[in-house]
Amino acid sequence: MLSNNIQAKEKISSRSGPVKRGKKMNIKPFFYLLPSGILISIFIGFPVLYTLYLSFFNWNLISPTKEFVGFNNYINVFTDPTNRQVMFNTLIYIGILVILNFVIPYLISIIVNFFIGKTKGPYKILFFIPSLFSLVVGAMLFSWILNPVSGPVALILRDYGMKLPQWTNSGSLAIIVICLITNWKVFGYNFILLLTGLGSIPKNIIEAAKIDGIPKWRVIWDIVLPMNKSVSVYVLILTIVEGLQYVFTPLNVITQGGPNYGSSNILYHTYLNGFVLYKTGNASALATVTFIIFLILLALEIKFVEGGRKHAD
């Protein structure tokens, strides 16, 4: 009986032909991706590696030789008083930007979505209009409006016996004004992203909670916010990364990092060291530290946003 089964299997295998042990790899997709890969390697990959290389040298962009200093530039990033002040300023920027560009848009998007209801369109248009303008225009506009001597705000306050402080001479006040300019640019985009995320939550879950008599604030806290976690984490990380980048323009237009580095941040200080003071090694070390921070934020985005989508699916 066993021999008959073996013979039958051999006949079936001989009729069906030889068994394929493996599939040939399709290399067409790699050819399609090759142009993008080349461009990314030239304009992103090589500059990142070369910046990492320069961070171990002392060079002024002019001298034909580079002095190898090892990790001294990285030590200088965390020990130099100016660099530490810039790092502290960067943390202040992040804190203010998170409040202005994430917390407040999130609160307003919740109010618009759950308490206002159908008339969402005008709010989207109203908040998004500033995003269409250049940050240079915004910086010049705010510097004129908030001019301590001849600006409209100063003239109005003068009529009431008050005086607008010289915010350009104060690092902390300059940081607040620069964050307000960035908020004017970014607020509408973040608001629409958060509002869209809230609108994608299934209505039947919210209606079932209402039928059960659960208070609206409990529905928002226990149901809406957890279900919107992936979008909120994405906007939070976007606020930090793009906020620090957007801050560069008003910094360069209004304060140039002054007074005495009081309004500078890590991105502007990297530019200042590299292309104004010609401290290429220090600038490269700052850029590498910033790149590592952004990589950590990217890993968090992948973990919470992409991971959240997989669990939802």
Image (cartoon, helix red, strand yellow):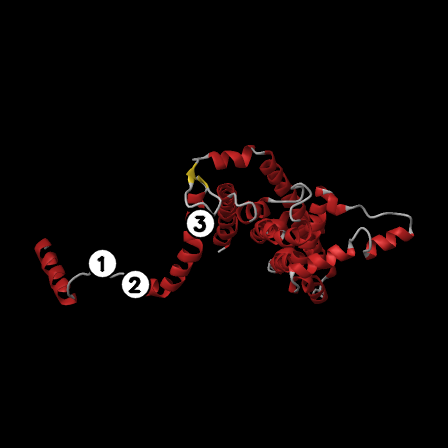
**Would you name the residue on which mark 3 appears?**
48
**Would you name the residue on which mark 2 appears?**
27
Q: What is the three-letter code of the residue carrying label 1?
A: Gly
Query: Would you identify the image quadrant in which residue 249 lies?
Result: bottom right
Q: Nearer the viewer, mark 3 or mark 1?
A: 3
Callout 1 crowding tier (Cα within 10 Å): few <14, some 14–19, many ≥20? few
Disc 2 vs disc 3: Cβ atoms closer than 8 Å? no
**Would you name the residue on which mark 1 appears?**
22
SS for dot 2 = loop
> Of label 1 and label 2, which has the lower sequence position?
1
Q: What is the three-letter code of the residue carrying label 2?
A: Ile
Per the rendering, the mark at residue 208 is none
Along the line of sight, the residue nearer the viewer: 225 or 51: 51
Q: Is residue 53 visible?
A: yes
Query: Would you identify the image quadrant in which residue 208 lies?
Result: bottom right
Expressed as whole percent of the image width and height from the top left, the position of residue 140 reads: 71, 58
The vertical placement of 167 against 84, above or below, is below
Disc 3 vs disc 1: Cβ atoms closer than 8 Å? no
Along the line of sight, the residue nearer the viewer: 12 or 272: 272
Residue depicted at x 44% and y 40%: 57
Along the line of sight, the residue nearer the viewer: 52 or 200: 52
Instruction: Please indicate whether residue 112 sits to the left or right of residue 36 in the image.
Output: right
Expressed as whole percent of the image width and height from the top left, the position of residue 306 reads: 49, 52
Q: Nearer the viewer, mark 2 or mark 3?
A: 3
> Of label 2 and label 3, which has the lower sequence position?
2
SS for dot 3 = helix
The vertical placement of 208 against 274, above or below, is below
Q: CA distance from mark 2 to mark 3?
A: 28 Å
Instruction: Please indicate whether residue 111 sits to the left or right of residue 161 in the image.
Output: left
